[in-house]
Image (cartoon, grey):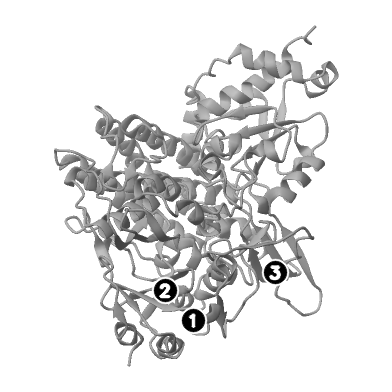
């Protein structure tokens, strides 16, 4: 039996639009073996609630999302990490937040819990208080060999970026092993969402990762709307996509500029910064906020696009489109820059596929996946975006995917604004029970949101999965054998979110 | 291909916006916090170390934008440095996450006197939407002695610039009697 068929033997739970199947603990225990035998079922993420573990998968052929759950009897469940390495960090996180242990797990060291919260298992329903004592020292995986030394970096980094710890094992100039240690920005986001109505909790989805505020806000809103059976007004659907594409454009411009900057090539950085500033000002003119935070709400969007907003957006995008070819020629024609990006930070397509990496990380390593196309959602069903795929797997490939997507996003925004439906942009939500999920393509990959509401319409269980969960581990692989000095440029080409995975 | 563009940029007008006005009451309040000795020591220039104590990275995007050609922070003598050891200002974003407490305190300890701590964004002001979480102490003030608050979610580059210019003005102002 395939892994997908095994999951479908479970009891359907009435979740929308992707069904969730409840398996007996014994059936779940058969999942790792079934997953090992069936590589076509991609692992998207894992989370829990008190006494219950959940996992999300993508059927690569059928492009359907499949949710599976099982009770964690006496706090234990069968680990998926032996079959899907992407599950390792989720299992560590589940142990820290819900106090459920994955049996047979590849790695059970703490992840988000640094021993500083004053309690253990904050989401377990009965967190245990921890009194005093020194927080434990982290343990890192070893590397052995002649002349190997360690370089600890962070949590506070040298640039204006988020905190996290990188432990490098280095032999001469070469990185032998990189290990990440995160959790520094853990804010207890999920715990703050529980017990709130969907609309009140949307502020937390919008702040899971500020650079993806539209994408996560949209995923959360779409999950809530699916749970409640609410249809969003067509004008709101179109404006969500306008904001989503603008978010993609400003972030791609930012990343392109910063990759060049990390190679000490200032001109593209200056120009990309200027063009991006134009886009952000247009966003502020159209939607009243430069990053468009808190604009996507369960039930639609608010406020409606301002008068003159569309013109401001089109003018900013016109400037981006006009200059992109010239910037690309400069990027391609300077050997000093090409020398730093071509062949650097190679991510093997086999690994990208094994981790089901989304966004430019996956598509830069030949993984043909974009959630806007498959499983797909409105309004992209009516205007399917072109798939930007590169096979190179290096920093250059990830840059090229971004630049190709700039063009696609600009034409999408134009079409969306030209065909913008009239009408209202926000509808009220009923206070009722339901369960829903959504997969929305943000700039760095697909954002997954899942939630369950009780009869009063309050959140009983929720999870938000940033695409970085499956990309960060690949950075550890991509940096291996590179020189230490190339880490910043590799890191920037991945541009994973810290806050998004720290929850 | 690049050279003609650089030459044109040299001859053309700068893209940079004019500086925003600075609220005088903020300047006066900051001036009172700064000893005359410190004022002469710092001069009209500040080195800033940005520390993220657990933000969603929205504030980082706007702090980064301060360095683009539209805002060009360095024209005011304000620049970002790579280590707190080189800094006069710790510019802290995000709620004070418990997992960052030790790192924040260490960053403050490494920053030579005289120094300022600027809390940037609604989360840094009082914890923002994350107030009351088991993982958050509160605002940055719960961990570090804060001199200046710049609210906003995130504050725009203009608002950040206003606040930072107030610091500069406070240094330039004569010592309060």
Q: CA distance from mark 1 to mark 3?
A: 32 Å
Q: Is residue A1 left or right of residue A76?
A: left
Rendering coords of residue A359 (x, y %):
40, 61
Rendering coords of residue B20 (x, y %):
53, 18
Rendering coords of residue A307 (x, y %):
24, 27
Q: CA distance from mark 3 to mark 2?
A: 37 Å
* Position of A177 relative to A203 (above/below): below
**Mark nearer the viewer, 3 or 2:** 2
Q: Which of the two labelled residues, at mark 3 and mark 2, occupies the earlier sequence position?
A: 2
Q: Is there any visible trace of residue A379 in the rendered image? A: yes
Q: Which residue is mark 3?
A: A174
Q: Which residue is mark 2?
A: A55
Q: Secondary structure at mark 1?
A: loop
Residue farthest to the right? B37
Q: Which of the two labelled residues, at mark 1 and mark 2, occupies the earlier sequence position?
A: 2
Identify the residue at image location x=62%, y=13%: B25
Are the two marked residues, 1 and 2, in contact with CB atoms closer than 8 angstroms?
yes
Mark 1 and mark 3 on one chain:
yes
Chain bearing mark 2: A
């Amino acid at each position: 039996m395939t892994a997908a068929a095994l999951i479908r033997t479970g009891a359907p739970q009435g979740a929308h639009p992707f069904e969730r199947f409840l398996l007996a603990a014994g059936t779940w225990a058969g999942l790792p073996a079934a997953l090992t035998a069936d590589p076509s079922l991609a692992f998207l993420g894992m989370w829990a609630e008190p006494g219950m573990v959940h996992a999300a998968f993508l059927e690569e052929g059928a492009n359907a999302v499949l949710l599976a759950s099982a009770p964690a009897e006496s706090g234990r469940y069968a680990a998926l990490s032996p079959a899907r390495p992407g599950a390792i960090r989720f299992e560590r996180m589940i142990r820290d937040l819900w106090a459920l242990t994955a049996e047979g797990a590849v790695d059970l060291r703490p992840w988000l819990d640094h021993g500083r919260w004053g309690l253990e298992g904050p989401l377990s329903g009965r967190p245990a208080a921890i009194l005093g004592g020194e927080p434990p020292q982290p343990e890192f995986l070893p590397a052995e060999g002649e002349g190997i030394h360690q370089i600890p970096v962070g949590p506070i980094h040298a640039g204006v970026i988020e905190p996290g710890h990188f432990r490098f094992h280095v032999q001469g100039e070469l990185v032998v092993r990189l290990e990440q240690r995160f959790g520094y920005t853990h804010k207890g986001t999920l715990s703050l969402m529980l017990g709130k109505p969907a609309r009140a909790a949307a502020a937390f989805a919008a702040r899971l990762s500020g650079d993806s505020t539209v994408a996560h806000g949209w995923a959360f809103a779409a999950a809530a709307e699916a749970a409640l059976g609410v249809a969003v007004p067509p004008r709101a659907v179109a404006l969500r996509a306008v904001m989503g594409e603008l978010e993609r454009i400003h972030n791609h411009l930012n990343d392109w500029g910063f990759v060049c900057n990390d190679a000490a090539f200032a001109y593209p950085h200056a120009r990309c910064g200027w063009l991006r500033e134009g886009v952000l000002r247009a966003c502020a003119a159209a939607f009243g906020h430069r990053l468009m935070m808190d604009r996507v709400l369960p039930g639609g969007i608010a406020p409606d696009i301002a008068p003159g907003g569309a013109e401001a957006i089109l003018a900013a995008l016109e400037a981006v489109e006009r200059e992109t070819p010239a910037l690309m020629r400069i990027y391609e024609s300077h050997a000093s820059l090409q020398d730093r990006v071509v062949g650097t930070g190679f991510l093997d397509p086999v690994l990208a596929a094994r981790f089901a990496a989304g966004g430019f990380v996956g598509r830069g390593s030949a993984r043909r996946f974009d959630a806007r196309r498959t499983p797909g959602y409105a309004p992209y069903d009516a205007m399917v975006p072109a798939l930007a795929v590169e096979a190179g797997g290096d920093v250059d490939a990830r840059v090229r995917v971004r630049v190709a997507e700039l063009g696609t996003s600009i034409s999408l925004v134009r079409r969306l604004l030209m065909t913008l439906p009239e009408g209202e942009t926000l509808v009220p939500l009923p206070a009722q029970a339901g369960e829903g999920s959504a997969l929305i393509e943000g700039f760095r990959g697909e954002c997954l949101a899942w939630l369950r509401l009780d009869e009063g319409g309050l959140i009983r269980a929720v999870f938000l999965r940033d695409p970085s969960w499956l990309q960060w581990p690949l950075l550890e692989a991509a940096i291996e054998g590179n020189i230490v000095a190339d880490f910043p440029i590799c890191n920037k080409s991945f541009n994973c979110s810290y806050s998004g995975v720290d929850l | 291909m690049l050279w003609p563009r650089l030459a044109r940029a040299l001859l053309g007008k700068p893209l940079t916006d004019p500086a925003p006005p600075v609220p005088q009451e903020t300047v006066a309040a900051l001036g009172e916090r700064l000893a005359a000795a410190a004022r002469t020591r710092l001069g009209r220039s500040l080195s800033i170390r940005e520390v993220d104590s657990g933000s969603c990275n929205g504030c980082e995007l706007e702090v980064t934008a301060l360095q683009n050609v539209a805002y060009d922070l360095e024209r005011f003598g304000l620049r970002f440095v790579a280590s707190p050891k080189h800094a006069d200002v710790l510019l802290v974003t995000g709620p004070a996450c418990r997992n960052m407490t030790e790192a924040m305190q260490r960053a403050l300890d490494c920053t030579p006197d005289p120094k300022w701590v600027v809390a940037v964004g609604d989360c840094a002001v009082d914890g923002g939407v994350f107030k009351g979480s088991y993982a958050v102490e509160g605002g940055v003030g719960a961990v570090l002695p804060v001199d200046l608050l710049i609210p906003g979610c995130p504050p725009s580059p203009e608002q950040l610039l206003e606040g930072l210019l107030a610091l500069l003005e406070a240094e330039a102002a004569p010592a309060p009697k």
